[in-house]
Image (cartoon, helix red, strand yellow):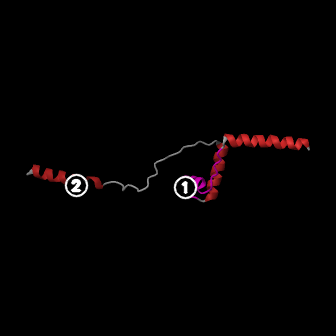
Amino acid sequence: MFHLKFYRMMDNQKKYAGNHGRKPKPDKMRHRYVFRLDDGDNARFLALFDESGKATKAEFIVSALFGREIKVIKLDKGTQDFYMRLTTFHSQFRAIG
């Protein structure tokens, strides 16, 4: 009799074992970045954070990074050489008069 109750209890525990704890979020934030600031930069960061009115510093940083357009400049060696030659040609042209 005891064994029968014990097995039923074990079956019930297995049945409900996965229903405990927090429900998983659909879009977890898994990536983390860390940076360090000196005293002056930290004071400026806190002043900007206070002005923003955001609830958390993480929310402020994300809005500051992704809320604005970020410009990416790619340097090409051939274009850079062309620019330098054009600049020297222009300076020679100005020297002639």
Residue 15, percent across and down? Answer: 22, 55
Amino acid type for the residue under numbered disc 1? Glu
In terms of image quadrants, where is residue 83?
top right
Identity of the residue furthest to the right in this view: 97
Q: Is residue 30 left or right of residue 52?
A: left
Distance from Cα at disc 1 to Cα at disc 2? 40 Å
Residue marked by disc 2: 15
Residue in front for this viewpoint, 14 or 81: 81
Residue marked by disc 1: 59
Identity of the residue furthest to the bottom in this view: 53
Residue 55 included in the magenta stretch of the image = yes
Lower position in the chain sequence, tag 1 or tag 2:
2
Mark 1 residue element: helix
Residue depicted at x 50% and y 46%: 32
Residue 50 included in the magenta stretch of the image = no
Residue 40, percent across and down? Answer: 67, 44
Residue depicted at x 62% and y 43%: 37
Q: Is residue 58 left or right of residue 26?
A: right
Above or below residue 25? Residue 88 is: above
Identity of the residue furthest to the left in this view: 1
The disc label shown at residue 83, or none: none
Q: Which residues are magenta?
A: 54-74
Q: Looking at the image, do the residues carrying marks 1 and 2 touch, with CB atoms under 8 Å apart?
A: no
Residue depicted at x 64% and y 54%: 48
Residue depicted at x 41% and y 56%: 26
Residue 51, percent across and down? Answer: 64, 58
Please tell me how crowded label 2 is: few (under 14), some (14-19), or many (20+) other residues with Cα within 10 Å. Answer: few
Amino acid type for the residue under numbered disc 2? Lys
Q: Is residue 52 left or right of residue 82?
A: left
Please tell me how crowded label 1 is: few (under 14), some (14-19), or many (20+) other residues with Cα within 10 Å. Answer: few
